Amino acid sequence: IACFRFKPMTNSKLHNLQEYVVAFGTTLLLCSQAAIGQPNTSAVIHLDGRSPGRTFEGVGGVSAGASTRLLYDYPEPQRSRILDYLFKPNYGASMQVLKVEMGGDMNSTDGAEPSHMRTPEEVNCERGYEWWLMKEAKARNPEIVLMGLEWGAPGWFQGGFWSDDNINYIIRWLDCATAKGLKIDYMGGWNERKFNADWYVKMSRAVKAKYP
C-alpha cells in the first residue's frame, strides 16, 4: 500500500523540523492502521501524579560477546582512566549496574568467552576477564549491582540448555564469584532466546537454596 511519498519541506507547509517530524509520524500511524485494516481510534492515557510509578534502577552496561576483551590489554594509566569513566560515581558514565556474560566457549557475538567448566568434573575460576572487570567496577563503586547471564552453554550438558547440568553450571559460576569476593545480585537464563518457565523456577530455587 502506497500511503505517502517524500516531498521537499517548504516554509509554506511546514514551518519547522518539529512539525515535519510530527506530520511524518502521524502519516506512518495512519498508514499502518490502514494497512492492517484497523479503524482509526484514539487511545486514552491516564496520568496520575500521586502514583509512585516504576522504580528507576540506574544506568548500566553489558560486558558480553567478547566486547571487553581489548580493554583488559590496554596499558596503564589509560586502562584505569577508562574504568574510572565507566564506574566511578559522579564521574563519567557513573554506571550503577554491570551485567556480564557467563562464558560458554562459544562465539557469542564478537568472539568467545571462556567457560569455567569445560567438562562436568572440572571447575576453573581463573579463566576470562569478566571477574577482573567486576572487581574493578566494585573497587570504584561498591554499591554497583552485578548481574550474570548466559549467551550459550557447553555441549556436554545432558538435556541441552534447559537441563539440570546447566543449573549446576550456574551454581558453580556463583561459587567462583563468591570465592573472588563478588556478590552477584541477579542471575538470568538464556540471552534473547526461548523461555522455559519450569526451568527458571527450578533454577531459582536451586540458587536460593545455595545462596539464600
Image (spheres, grey):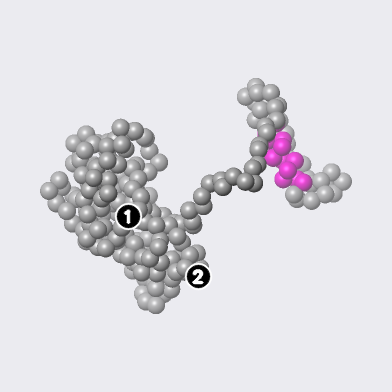
Would residue 105 be seen by someone viewing this image from the given angle? no
N-terminal-most mark, 1 or 2: 2
Q: Nearer the viewer, residue 138 or 103?
A: 138
Residue drawn at x 30%, y 51% is 102
Labelled pair 1, 2 in contact (Cβ < 8 Å): no
Residue under pointer 2: 91
Nearer to us: label 1 or label 2: 1
Q: Position of residue 124 (x, y in %)?
A: 18, 57
Residue drawn at x 32%, y 55% is 184
Q: Quadrant of residue 68?
A: bottom left
Separation (CA) of disc 1 from disc 2:
24 Å
Which segment did they paint magenta?
19-30
Residue drawn at x 70%, y 27% is 41
Q: Residue furthest left?
A: 121
Horizontally, residue 121 falls left or right of residue 210, namely left
The crowding category of the residue bearing disc 1, from other C-alpha atoms within 10 Å (few below 14, some 14 to 19, many at least 20), is some
Question: Looking at the rendering, in which quadrant would you find the N terminus?
Answer: top right
Residue under pointer 1: 184
Q: Secondary structure under badge 2?
A: loop
Q: Position of residue 137 (x, y in %)?
A: 38, 65
**Can residue 23 be found in the magenta stretch?**
yes
**Can residue 97 be found in the magenta stretch?**
no
